[in-house]
Image: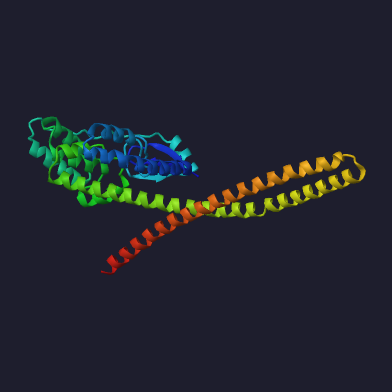
């Protein structure tokens, strides 16, 4: 399905489809897994590479609830008739407001103004004042803290805790937050770290669930293969061929003793029967080895499945006990 949207702020018109939404959801899952390693590298000291990786990742996502031109949330869906009417109507767009900063302002006043703008939800003005503050004090930890809030469009640390899960792949200032830390940035770093640990745990649990399901499918497949192999009784076929060879050899000697002549047919039947018999016996040994190997693999897979299942049940039991307390 195609969605046509219009921004009520700047008049921008754009569209997207269900395919775009699904593609972005897959991209977010992939990036969450990839960024987990990058962020922990940054927290461990690898600032530059993690920051570059995160900066590159920011451009890959689209917020379908915001205007791609002015980032406004004041958007509406339009129909085909409304689109035709809009095309026929001249669009008048007012100039965006200019943000002027007093060049004599102190860092304290710039920071305070930025805080007030954040409280009002005026993200552009807050970002402008924070940039002006960083031009004066490039190592101001509170400025980087507030810039991260502005990027997430949140007003305080409580909202940041909620937004952290949504914007987990958009933390380009993580290295600055750690390097130029303050009390507020330390709290934000702690929130981010805890969230990444939760994501890492969730990813690990999901991998275990996927492995358990994969192992179960593998066990069912192996059982089916064992069943099919057991339907082929190569040993019985080999024994029958040996009996035919014995009978053919007996007939050969009887004819030779009675007529003193060699029966070529009896010789050929004997030799062919012996060859087939030995090949069937070898095939049966190969079948037994395959069945034994499959049975051992089934035991190993079942052991892993039971281990994962026991861990999940133990965790669910602990969570139940904690909730009851």
Q: Is residue 5 left or right of residue 116?
A: right
Residue at image x 39%, y 45%?
76
What's the colour scheme?
rainbow
Residue at 41% x, 44% y: name it. 25
The picture places residue 255, in percent across and down from the top left corner, at 89, 45
Q: Nearer the viewer, residue 112 or 84?
A: 112
Residue 149, picture quadrant: top left
Residue 75 visible in image:
yes
Residue 123 vs residue 244, the one in the foreground: 244
Q: Is residue 156 left or right of residue 307?
A: left
What percent of the width, then of the height, locates residue 85? Answer: 46, 39
Residue 301 against residue 46 in the figure, above or below: below
Point out residue 102 in the picture as x, y percentages from the top left corner: 11, 32
Depth check, front residue: 275 or 66: 275
Does residue 235 sit above or below 20 in this rendering? below
For the image shown, how many numbered marks are present on the structure? 0
Res 111 → quadrant: top left
Q: Position of residue 320 (x, y in %)?
A: 32, 66
Q: Is residue 169 visible?
A: no
Horizontal side, residue 154 vs residue 69: left or right: left
Which residue appears at 40% of the width and 34% of the height? 90
Residue furthest to the bottom in view is: 324
Work out whether 309 lies above or below 52: below
For this rendering, which residue is in front, 311 or 13?
Answer: 311
Q: Is residue 82 left or right of residue 138?
A: right
């Amino acid at each position: 399905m195609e969605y046509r949207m219009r921004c009520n702020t700047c008049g921008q018109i754009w569209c997207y489809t269900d395919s775009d939404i699904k593609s972005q959801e897959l991209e977010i899952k992939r990036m969450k897994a990839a960024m987990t390693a990058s962020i922990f590298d940054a927290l461990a000291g690898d600032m530059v590479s993690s920051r570059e990786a995160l900066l590159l990742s920011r451009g890959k996502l689209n917020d379908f609830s915001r205007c791609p031109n002015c980032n406004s949330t004041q958007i509406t869906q339009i129909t085909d008739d409304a689109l035709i009417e809009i095309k026929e109507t001249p669009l008048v767009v007012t100039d965006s407001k200019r943000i002027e900063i007093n060049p004599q302002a102190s860092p304290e006043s710039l920071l305070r103004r930025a805080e007030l703008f954040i409280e009002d939800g005026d993200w552009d003005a807050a970002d402008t004042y924070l940039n002006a503050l960083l031009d004066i004090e490039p190592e101001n930890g509170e400025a980087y803290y507030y810039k991260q809030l502005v990027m997430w469009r949140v007003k305080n640390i409580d909202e940041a805790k909620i937004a952290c899960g949504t914007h987990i792949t958009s933390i380009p200032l993580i290295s600055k937050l750690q390097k130029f830390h303050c009390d507020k940035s330390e709290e934000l770093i702690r929130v981010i770290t805890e969230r990444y640990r939760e994501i890492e745990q969730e990813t690990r649990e999901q991998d275990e669930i996927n492995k358990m399901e994969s192992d179960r499918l593998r066990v069912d497949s192996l059982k089916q293969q064992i069943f099919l192999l057991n339907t082929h009784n190569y040993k019985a076929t080999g024994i029958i061929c040996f009996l035919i060879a014995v009978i053919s050899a007996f007939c050969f000697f009887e004819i030779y003793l009675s007529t003193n002549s060699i029966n070529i047919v009896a010789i050929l039947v004997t030799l062919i029967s012996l060859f087939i018999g030995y090949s069937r016996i070898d095939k049966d040994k190969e079948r037994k080895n395959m069945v034994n190997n499959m049975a051992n693999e089934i035991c190993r897979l079942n052991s892993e499945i039971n281990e994962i299942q026991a861990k999940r049940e133990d965790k669910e039991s602990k969570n139940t006990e904690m909730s009851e307390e």
